[in-house]
Amino acid sequence: MPALFMLGAAAAVLAPAPGASAEKLRAWPAMRHEGAAYAVATDRKNRIISCVPLDPATDATKVKAACATLAARGVPTAITPALAKGSSEEWFPSADYPAASIPEHKSGSVTIVYEIDERGVATDCMVQHSSGIAKLDVAACAAMLKRARFTPASFQGKPVHAAAIATFAYDSE
């Protein structure tokens, strides 16, 4: 039976081995630079280590410079990230995944960028890096939108829109 498990998330931290405690998924308010909005991933010290434009039409030549600028500015101290309610295992039950789509003894991962509204509900999802199996990519976004819930992100105490980058791995073993 295939399994789907989380490798990394908005915190951009690899999940511990099975049985160890995992950090909750976090999503920061979308960061803006020159009119474009970006989902950011941070390390454990909340330093921005990567970013992805929320609009796929964003000029690719500007993304690297924008991400460098955002990383240099850092996450404002008045921001509180959205925190996951429950675990990714609850959001991604194996029954949701098209087992027949995963060739035997095959593993891989899909990276998604998703948005969270002011109520803490996942509202939009796009595949950033495909697993190579379209049905699994679609299933990852569908499960995120159907089940993922967060405490809302906030800026100066007011709920705000957030965005995150997460990588989910699968294994047909």
Image (spheres, rainbow, N blue to C red):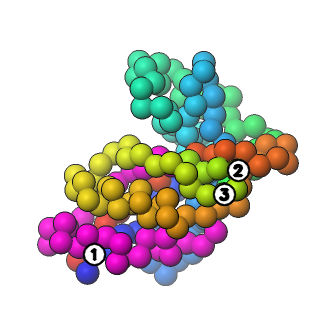
Judge from the rendering whether residue 109 lies leftward or rightward of residue 47; answer left or right: left
In this picture, is 57 found above or below 116? above
Q: Please rate how many residues cluster around mark 2, counting C-alpha atoms within 10 Å: few if below 14, some from 14 to 19, many from 20.
A: some
Image coordinates of residue 67 in percent, x first then y, are: 54, 28
Judge from the rendering whether residue 158 lies leftward or rightward of residue 162; answer left or right: right
Image coordinates of residue 164 in percent, x first then y, are: 55, 48
Q: Which mark is residue 120?
A: 3
Judge from the rendering whether residue 24 lies leftward or rightward of residue 95; answer left or right: right
Q: Quadrant of residue 7?
A: bottom left
Residue depicted at 43% across the width and 70% down the height: 92
In this picture, is 137 found above or below 32? below
Residue depicted at 65% across the width and 61% down the height: 150
N-terminal label among 3 and 1: 1
Q: In this figure, which residue is indicated by the disc labeled 2? A: 118
Quarter of the image with the N terminus in it: bottom left
Residues at marks 3 and 1, CA–CA distance in whole angstroms? 29 Å
Image coordinates of residue 66 in percent, x first then y, are: 54, 23
Quarter of the image with the C terminus in it: bottom left
For label 2, the SS is loop
For label 1, the SS is loop
Residue depicted at 49% across the width and 70% down the height: 91
N-terminal label among 1 and 2: 1
In this picture, is 126 found above or below 144? above
Q: Amino acid at mark 1?
A: Pro
Residues at marks 1 and 2, CA–CA distance in whole angstroms? 33 Å
Q: Quadrant of residue 40?
A: top right
Q: Can residue 11 be seen?
A: no
What's the magenta region? 85-114
